[in-house]
C-alpha cells in the first residue's frame, strides 16, 4: 500500500517535471520567435529609411510625376491640353512653327481643354500665348461672350504691364456689351497709373461709372492715390467719391508736397 502511494507521488512529480520542461521550452521558442520577428521588423525599417525603393522584397519605381500640389493641379488638365501648353511654350519664339502648331493642335481641342490651356497660360504669365489662345477661342462655334474669360486675361495683361493689349481687349469686351467687376477696374486703373497714363485711367473710371453694378471704394481710392500729382483730375474723382460714399473719409496730404494750388 505504501509502495503504491509512493509510485503515485513519483509519477505525479515526473509529469509535473515534464510539463514544466515543455512549458519552459515553448516559452523559449516563443521568445526566440518574437525576437526574430522584432529583429526582422527593425531591419526592414532601417532599410526603408535608407533604401526606400526596396521594401519587403519588392522594388518601387518612381513614375516621374511630381509630388504634392503641383501634380494634383495638373490632374485637372487633360493630356491633350498639357501637350498643347508645352508645344506653345516651346515654339513661342518661332512664328511660322507656332502658327502651324496652332492650326494642327490648338484648333482641334475641345471646349474645356481650350479653356484649361488659356487658364494655365495666364497662371504661368505667358500672356502673349494666352492672348493667341483667346483669339482662337473667339472664332469657335461654341463661343459666347463671357465676362470671366475677359476678366482673367485682362488682369493678367495689366499685371504684365501690357496696357496696349489691355485697351484692345477692353474695346472688344465693351463691343460684346460686357461690364467687368470691381477687381478688374481696380487692376486696370492701377496698371494705367503705374504706366504713367492718367488719361487712360480716367477713361476706365468713366466707364466704371456707367457700369450697371454699384461701384466699390477700392478703385476710387487707387485712383485718388495715383492722381495726387494731378490735382484737377483728383478733385473731380474726389467729388464723385464724396457723393457716392458720404460716410467715408479721404486722406488729403499737404498740398505743397505736390505743388497743388
Image (tube, grey):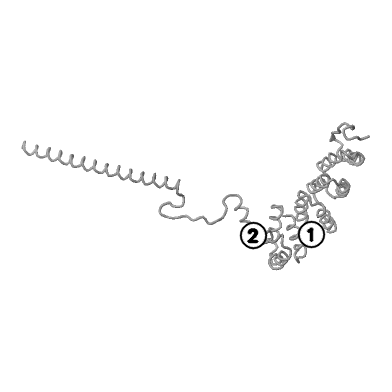
Residue carrying label 2: 82
Mark 2 vs mark 1: in front = 2
Regarding mark 2 in the picture, which secondary structure is present there?
Answer: helix
Task: Decide if residue 211 is on the left or right side of residue 85.
Answer: right
**Residue at the spot 51% in from the left edge and 55% down from the top edge:** 62
Residue carrying label 1: 145
Image quadrant where residue 241 sits? top right
85 versus 26 height, above or below: below
The one nearer the camera, 90 or 6, is: 90
Q: Badge 2: how crowded within 10 Å, few (<14), some, or many (20+)?
A: some
**Residue at the spot 88% in from the left edge and 35% down from the top edge:** 258
Task: Decide if residue 49 is on the left or right side of residue 174.
Answer: left
Q: Residue furthest front?
A: 94
143 versus 230 height, above or below: below
Quadrant location, the C terminus = top right
Quadrant location, the N terminus = top left
Task: Decide if residue 74 is on the left or right side of residue 236.
Answer: left
Please state the horizontal and vertical placement of residue 48, each as a whole percent of the image. 44, 47
First along the sequence among labels 2 and 1: 2
C-alpha distance separating marks 2 and 1: 25 Å
The one nearer the camera, 141 or 153, is: 153
Task: Decide if residue 161 is on the left or right side of residue 119.
Answer: right
**Residue at the spot 60% in from the left edge and 50% down from the top edge:** 69
Q: Pointers 2 and 1 in contact (CB under 8 A)?
A: no
Please state the horizontal and vertical placement of residue 250, each as a whole percent of the image. 85, 35
**Residue at the spot 26% in from the left edge and 44% down from the top edge:** 26
Please state the horizontal and vertical placement of residue 132, each as a whole percent of the image. 75, 60
Mark number displayed over residue 125: none
Please state the horizontal and vertical placement of residue 54, each as a whole percent of the image. 43, 52
Amino acid at each position: 500500500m505504501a509502495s503504491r502511494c509512493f509510485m503515485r507521488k513519483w509519477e505525479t512529480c515526473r509529469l509535473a517535471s515534464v510539463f514544466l520542461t515543455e512549458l519552459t521550452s515553448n516559452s523559449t521558442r516563443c521568445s526566440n520567435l518574437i525576437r526574430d520577428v522584432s529583429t526582422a521588423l527593425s531591419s526592414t525599417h532601417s532599410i526603408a529609411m535608407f533604401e526606400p525603393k526596396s521594401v519587403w522584397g519588392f522594388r518601387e519605381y518612381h513614375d516621374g510625376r511630381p509630388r504634392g500640389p503641383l501634380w494634383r493641379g495638373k490632374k485637372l488638365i487633360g493630356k491633350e491640353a498639357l501637350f498643347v501648353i508645352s508645344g506653345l511654350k516651346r515654339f513661342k519664339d518661332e512664328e511660322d512653327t507656332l502658327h502651324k502648331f496652332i492650326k494642327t493642335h490648338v484648333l482641334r481641342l475641345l471646349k474645356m481643354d481650350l479653356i484649361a490651356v488659356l487658364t494655365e497660360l495666364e497662371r504661368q504669365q505667358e500672356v502673349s500665348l494666352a492672348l493667341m489662345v483667346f483669339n482662337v477661342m473667339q472664332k469657335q462655334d461654341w463661343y459666347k461672350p463671357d465676362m470671366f474669360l475677359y476678366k482673367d486675361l485682362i488682369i493678367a495683361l495689366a499685371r504684365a504691364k501690357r496696357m496696349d493689349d489691355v485697351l484692345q481687349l477692353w474695346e472688344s469686351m465693351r463691343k460684346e456689351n460686357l461690364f467687368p467687376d470691381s477687381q478688374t477696374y481696380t487692376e486696370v486703373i492701377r496698371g494705367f497709373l503705374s504706366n504713367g497714363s492718367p488719361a487712360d485711367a480716367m477713361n476706365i473710371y468713366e466707364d466704371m461709372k456707367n457700369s450697371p453694378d454699384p461701384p466699390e471704394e477700392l478703385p476710387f481710392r487707387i485712383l485718388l492715390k495715383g492722381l495726387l500729382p494731378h490735382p484737377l483730375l483728383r478733385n473731380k474723382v474726389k467729388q464723385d467719391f464724396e457723393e457716392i460714399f458720404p460716410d467715408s473719409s479721404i486722406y488729403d496730404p499737404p498740398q505743397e508736397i505736390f505743388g497743388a494750388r
